[in-house]
């Protein structure tokens, strides 16, 4: 068995665990143990994304290897957000690795679009009666991507949720940066390294895709 490298981001109340080489495969828990358990539980759901990218996850049952524990930035982990750049995120990126990152982000978008296509407009409310419905969630994800793209030097107005051409064009601009070989540093001053940008974008897309799936299913 080969261990999957994972880094753990420590907040005051919550912990985020992320698979370092698999953008978007991140989960949260009240402790490191719970975060890793949640990460393992979501392996089958993320495997679908990997397959869409033409890749295969390590076999089920392979262990995680925690390569770094780092404090969260701005309390992000307490909101379930992977907000810190890991040491492994600034390694040089060759053409093959850049293409792999871009493929996984594209796959996350594909998975999200498929979920949106079959989800009801009105989603089941959370335990406290909160949560966005489908249209507002899609708009929220597009808004997040508009902000995230600026961290890699890509600027565009937020697309309307029904403007497929504008969404595709914006995504293509993001992919063009992610699939570019680099020294591993941020592509723009004060920006995000490509690996972290790929993780943050894919995490946000998948987190809401999975939420939409869960809240779109009637309770038994």
Image (spheres, rainbow, N blue to C red):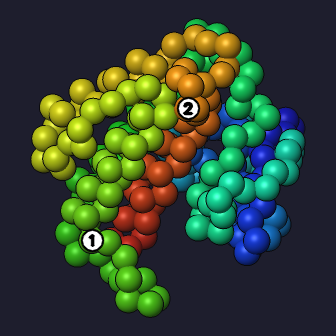
| Quadrant in which the C terminus is drawn | bottom left
Residue corresponding to mark 1: 133
Q: Position of residue 91 (x, y in %)?
A: 74, 22
Mark 1 lies on a secondary structure that is loop
| Quadrant in which the N terminus is drawn | top right
- The reply to whether callout 2 and callout 1 are in contact (CB within 8 Å) is no
| Residue lying at 55% horizontally and 32% vertically, measured from the top left | 191
Q: Which mark is residue 48?
A: none
Residue corresponding to mark 2: 191
Would residue 138 appear left or right of 193 to someone viewing this image?
left
Foreground of the two, 57 or 130: 130
* Whether residue 127 is situated above or below residue 101 in the rendered picture: below
Foreground of the two, 48 or 186: 186
Quadrant of the rendered image containing residue 30: bottom right
| Residue lying at 42% horizontally and 59% vertically, measured from the top left | 208
Mark 2 lies on a secondary structure that is loop
Quadrant of the rendered image containing residue 59: top right
Q: Position of residue 35 (x, y in %)?
A: 73, 64
Q: Is residue 90 visible?
A: yes
């Amino acid at each position: 068995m080969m261990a999957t490298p994972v880094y753990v981001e420590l907040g005051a109340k919550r912990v985020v665990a992320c698979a370092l080489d698999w953008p978007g495969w991140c989960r949260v828990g009240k402790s490191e143990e719970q975060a890793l358990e949640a990460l393992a539980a979501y392996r089958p759901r993320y495997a679908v994304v990997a397959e869409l990218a033409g890749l295969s996850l390590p076999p089920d049952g392979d262990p995680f290897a925690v390569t770094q524990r780092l404090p969260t930035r701005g309390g992000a982990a307490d909101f379930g957000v992977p907000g810190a750049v890991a040491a492994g995120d600034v390694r040089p990126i060759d053409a093959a690795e850049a293409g792999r990152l871009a493929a996984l982000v594209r796959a996350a978008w594909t998975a999200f679009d498929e979920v949106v296509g079959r989800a009801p407009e009105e989603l089941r409310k959370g335990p406290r009666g909160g949560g966005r419905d489908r249209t507002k969630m899609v708009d929220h994800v597009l808004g997040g991507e508009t902000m995230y793209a600026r961290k890699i030097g890509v600027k565009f107005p937020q697309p309307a949720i029904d403007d497929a051409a504008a969404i595709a064009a914006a995504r293509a601009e993001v992919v063009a940066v992610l699939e570019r070989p680099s020294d591993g540093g941020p592509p723009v001053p004060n920006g995000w390294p490509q690996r972290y940008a790929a993780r943050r974008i894919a995490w946000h897309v998948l987190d809401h895709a999975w939420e939409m799936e869960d809240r779109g299913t009637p309770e038994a």
